Structures are given as structure tokens and as C-alpha cells.
Image: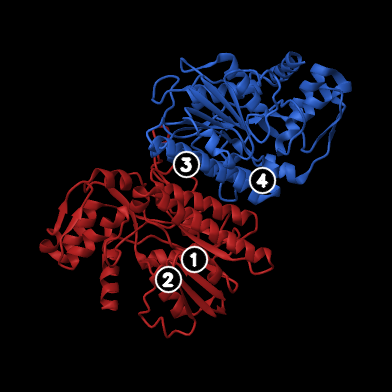
Chain colours: A blue, B red
């Protein structure tokens, strides 16, 4: 098996790669090559000396030849321009998200048309595909059959890619699967340009003794998943058979990864409980209208049945998410 | 006002152009230029001598410079590769439908970014955006808030364009409106490559004394609208103000044009009623699995409230649709 991961240097990419390197098999077959693609891949963590790892640097659309130089059995497409970037630079988002995904799908299609394997393409989409409108109220429980009307360029670009993946699958060009990610928290590392980044930094920074700003009112509710459960969900969706039995992928609809619904106030209360007043008091609430509008347009409460049918469950509590973060931090320290 | 119509030689385009040439105004202002764009525009019907008419021949993406050489106030984008074409040639559909629409939207965006007028862009979409899936049953009444999961390349391409129009509108690049057309019948002229073409030919051909083949079982129900009501709907959506009052366009959701639901058997019974047994017996039922799958994937029963709020009503009966067709035929004879 040759497995390609785009966005391999992103924090989900790194976790996914770590899991794949530990397992070293896919569907019972050995992973012969594990190809990590990103603009820059840091050769840390033993990557450079792992005999199955290949690294492909640079802009994805310039590197398709390398990625598909040998047959791609599995493609995890995680690379994307993030929400605030896409809002700031529309063309960047269209290129990085829509055009790149289409080019990858076309490369996979060319491979299968030439008699090569049908690539299994796992596309990381987002809850940002949903939004309300004067003519569309989101239902109390959002599911995969809820009409998606994004309120951000990022959400539209992800939704367009979803439809491409689904259609390339219907036509038999690829075996595509769409996983809609919830807001992933607590993200390690530095803040990025995702509008939802604060949902990690208001926990991560105070735990490390640093101040953090919360740009939304604490009453806002959000749909979260830990990095661990998110990667687990991606793998489960990737490996599921197609059919209607238990653990199988039924139809071509996307799968919303399971969400834990919490308010920002509950998140901050958990921080206080875990790390005490001194840490919790490092957070300053400073509502920012643009961030509130963007993050507030995403639904917070999901019907998780489609994920549950694949054996996926949400994180049990925000406390467990924080404990996961602390354990991960200790592990990598 | 400068009004551009793409697909101006198509049968809806010709009807729309005829109406605009008769009115000669838009929102109270004179139509200064009426630009007809299509691969080939026949200079019949007094077009060549109408002083407001400009004709732009050729591939749209090669002609953007001409179309936007002067400011475009209103753009009706009707040009498209049709359903069976898109199913037969995926790349053709992506180019003709998705890439061309994106190029038009970008040209309109460049115009407004340069201080020119915000183009009002009316995009003709289709009921083909809807479809069912093992994980998605279409509800008994389909509305604009029903989740769209197309089962054809044409439907996916239309849906992607819808999302582009909607997003370019949200960002203030254009003032876009999406009208989802029902199956338009009875189409005049020759059969085209639309999978739904038989829904016109099984009426039009026998009325003209010619045989016709019906490739679906007569129990199949379909959602129809006459050419006259379809053009009327496009114009109403194009001219509506934005707001929540009566006759106004509320939010950015598409508008499904109102549909008359009939079975093919009812259509054939009406033919028999209007034209007698000799005409009706010219129709041969020969189910074709591919056509049945494509046309049968489209919903047949619609909740028409969003259209009704704009003052749009479905055709009252299939008999009235046939009478419309006969009247139009007499008029152009």
C-alpha cells in the first residue's frame, strides 16, 4: 500500500502520520510507502530515518507528478487554507482549496483510468459548510441531511470540494469519503489563522502560563472534538467498507464527525477547575464582531447518528478533552 | 442599462430575449444595449436590425472581454452543457458549466472592484441538484431547504455554480440570484441532448404527426413548467428587490421555480384528449435504464412557497401547458 497524506505538517497531519507509522499496515496489508506532502515537512521525530517515509515538499499542484509517480492507494487530503485566510484572500482560498482538490481528484482519476488502483480519497471537510440565512433556520439538531448554506468562503470551498469528491465517487473515478471535522480543540502549538483558533488558545495558553484573548461572548456554544478522536474518526471513515451493515459507510453523504457541544463559559470553567484561578484569570474576553459572526454561524449541536453507526463517539466531556491535551503535552515533552 | 444573455440561442434564451426586446426597459430605465451571447446566434426575427442588440459569437470564456467591454448591469447566464452531454463527457461539463460560470463571475467581480456597477447575475440552475441516496430519502415535498445531493454530473455542476453565485453575492462581488428550473415542457424545435428531452418530444412530435419514443415507464412523475412561466419566473427573480416584504427576495437561498406535478401517463392522456387516438398512438414506450435512472432521480413534488412569495404560480394543468405550446406554435408559424 502507498498512502499519501497532504497537509502532513499540520497538527492533524502529524498525528495521523504518527498513527500510520505506528500501525504500518492498511487493511491488513503493509504500508510500503507513506508519502508526506506539505509546503515544508520538518524532518523531526525520526521521519528522515523511517524507511517507509517519503517527503514531498512544495505547492501541491506543482507536485502532483511526484505524488502520483507510483500508484496512490490511499490519499488523505488534509491540506487547506484555513477560514480566516480564505475570508481575507478569496482567490487564495479558491486556489488552495478548490483548485488543488480538483487537481488531486483528476490525478487519481487519471490513475484509475489508466488501469491503476482506484484511490481511496479521504477529504477533510468542516462544520463550516453549515450556516443559516433569512430563509433557512438551522434545525435544533444538525445532521448530514441538513441543507448546507455556508456563511464563509472557507465553508463554500469545502462544500464545493465535498461535491467533487462525491461526484468523482459516483462516476467511479475514485473511492471518496468526506469527513466533516468539528472544531478541533485543544490544538497544540502556535495560534494559526483559523477563526476558531481561540477555542484552543484560551485553554492552551493559560495552561502554559500565558495570557489569551477570547473574541466571543462566553455564552456562545460550539461543537468540539479532541485531536485524538478526530484522527480516529478520519481513519475509521477511511477504512470503512461500503454497505449498509454495522461499521459500513452507507451512501455517499458526508459523515459529520461526532461533536461535543459546550459553551465557551463551560470551557473556561473547566480551565478554572483544572488549573485554578490564576490560570483562568489569564483569559480576557474581548468580543470581535468578525470572529463572532464567523464562528457563530457554525452549528453547535449535532445529531451524531451517522458517525455512531461507524462506531464513533464524541468526547465524553470538555474535561476529558483538556486531560487529553495535557497527556499529549506530557508525552511529547 | 446593458443586459447580457448567455445561451441566447437556446429556446429559453430566445424567449427571454424576445420579452426583453418587447419591453425595452429594466427597472424603469431603458435597455441601452441587449447583448446576445452564444456559440452561434441566428440573425433572424429582426435581431440584426434592432438597434439595441449586440451579438457576441463563440465560446464564452474567449469572449469575456467583449461581454465586459462596457459595464454589465444585468447578466442572465443560461448557457450550459445539458444533462446527457455532461454524463457522457465529464470534462466538457466541468468546463462548460463550472469553469465558464466562475469566469463570468470573476469578470463581474473585476468590474465592481474597479468601481463599475455591481452586476445582477441571474443563474439558471436546475431541479437536477436534488437526488436521493441510501442515507438520504427525499421528503414528500421538496423545498429550497432540502439537502441537495445530485445524482448526475450536470446536477453537481449546477450545484457548484449555485454555491459560487451565492458566495460571490455574500462577499459583495455581484448581486446574484439562483433560479432552479423545473423540467421545461413543451420545448419547441428539435430534440436536444437533455435527458428530459423526451418530456417535450412525446407531446411535440405526435402533435406534428411524427412518432416519438418514451424512454420511461408511464407511472413516472415529473415536475414541469411551461416555457412561458419559466421565462416569467426568471424575470421576476431577476427584478425582485432584496428584503423580506412581499415580492422580495428573502436571503440567499435559491428559488425553485414553481412546478406542476404530473405523471407521464397523465401527459399522454392529455395528448390523447387534445389530439386524438391517432396522435397518441404515435408514442411508443421503450424504457431506457439510463434515462429512467437520471430523470427518476429528480424530485417530482415541490413545496412552491418560496416562489409563491414572489408571486409565481405553477402552470394550472398539463392541458394548459399543451395549449400554451399550440398557441406559441401558431404564433411563430
Q: Would residue B300 be seen by someone viewing this image from the given angle?
A: no
Horizontal side of A97 relative to B293 (left or right) equals right
Q: Nearer the viewer, residue B248 or A114?
A: A114
Task: Give me the disc on residue B16.
Answer: 2
Badge 4 vs badge 1, beta-carbon distance below 8 Å: no
User: Can marks 3 and 2 be said to lie on one chain?
Assistant: no
Residue A267 drawn at (x, y percent): 75, 26
> Are dots 2 and 1 in contact, CB under 8 Å?
yes
Mark 2 against mark 4, which lies toward the viewer?
4
Q: Are marks 3 and 4 on the same chain?
A: yes
At 47% from the left and 69% from the top, the residue drawn is: B5
Q: Which mark is residue A106?
A: 3
Label 1: state its secondary structure: strand
Q: Which of the marked residues, 2 or 1, is nearer the chain's N terminus?
A: 2
Q: Secondary structure at mark 2?
A: helix
The secondary structure type at the circle numbered 3 is helix
Mark 3 touching mark 4, by CB under 8 A? Answer: no
Q: Residue at x 56, y 45 (%)?
A: A98
- Please identify the quarter of the rendering in which residue A21 is found: top right
**Callout 3–callout 2 Cβ contact below 8 Å:** no
- Labels 4 and 1 positioned on one and the same chain: no
How far from the left and from the top, in percent, is residue B210?
15, 64
Amino acid at each position: 500500500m502507498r498512502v499519501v497524506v497532504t497537509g502532513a505538517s499540520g497538527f492533524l497531519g502529524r498525528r495521523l502520520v504518527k498513527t500510520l507509522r505506528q500501525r504500518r499496515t492498511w487493511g491488513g496489508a503493509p504500508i510500503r510507502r507513506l508519502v508526506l506532502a506539505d509546503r515544508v515537512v520538518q524532518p523531526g521525530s525520526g521521519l528522515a530515518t523511517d524507511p517507509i517515509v517519503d517527503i514531498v515538499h512544495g505547492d501541491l499542484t506543482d507536485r502532483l507528478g511526484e505524488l502520483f509517480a507510483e500508484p496512490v492507494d490511499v490519499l488523505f487530503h488534509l491540506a487547506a487554507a484555513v477560514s480566516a485566510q480564505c475570508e481575507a484572500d478569496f482567490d487564495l482560498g479558491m486556489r488552495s482549496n478548490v483548485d488543488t482538490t480538483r487537481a488531486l481528484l483528476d490525478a487519481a482519476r487519471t490513475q484509475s483510468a489508466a488501469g491503476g488502483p482506484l484511490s481511496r480519497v479521504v477529504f477533510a471537510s468542516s462544520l463550516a459548510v453549515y450556516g443559516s440565512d433569512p430563509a433557512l433556520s438551522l434545525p435544533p439538531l444538525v445532521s448530514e441531511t441538513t441543507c448546507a448554506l455556508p456563511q464563509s468562503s472557507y465553508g463554500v470551498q469545502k462544500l464545493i470540494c465535498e461535491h467533487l469528491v462525491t461526484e468523482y465517487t459516483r462516476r467511479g473515478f475514485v473511492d471518496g469519503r468526506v469527513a466533516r471535522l468539528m472544531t478541533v480543540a485543544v490544538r497544540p502549538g502556535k495560534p494559526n489563522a483559523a477563526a476558531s483558533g481561540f477555542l484552543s488558545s484560551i485553554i492552551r495558553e493559560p495552561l502554559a502560563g500565558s495570557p489569551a484573548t477570547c473574541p466571543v461572548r462566553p455564552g456562545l456554544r460550539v461543537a468540539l472534538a479532541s485531536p485524538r478522536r478526530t484522527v480516529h474518526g478520519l481513519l475509521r471513515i477511511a477504512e470503512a467498507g461500503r454497505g449498509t451493515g454495522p461499521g459500513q459507510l452507507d451512501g455517499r453523504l458526508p459523515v459529520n464527525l461526532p461533536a461535543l457541544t459546550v459553551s465557551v463559559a463551560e470551557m473556561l470553567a473547566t480551565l478554572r477547575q483544572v488549573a485554578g484561578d490564576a490560570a483562568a484569570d489569564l483569559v480576557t474576553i474581548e468580543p470581535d464582531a468578525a470572529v463572532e459572526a464567523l464562528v457563530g454561524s457554525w452549528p453547535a449541536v449535532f445529531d451524531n447518528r451517522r458517525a455512531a453507526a461507524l462506531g464513533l463517539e464524541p468526547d465524553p466531556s470538555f474535561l476529558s478533552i483538556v486531560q487529553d491535551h495535557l497527556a499529549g503535552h506530557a508525552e511529547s515533552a
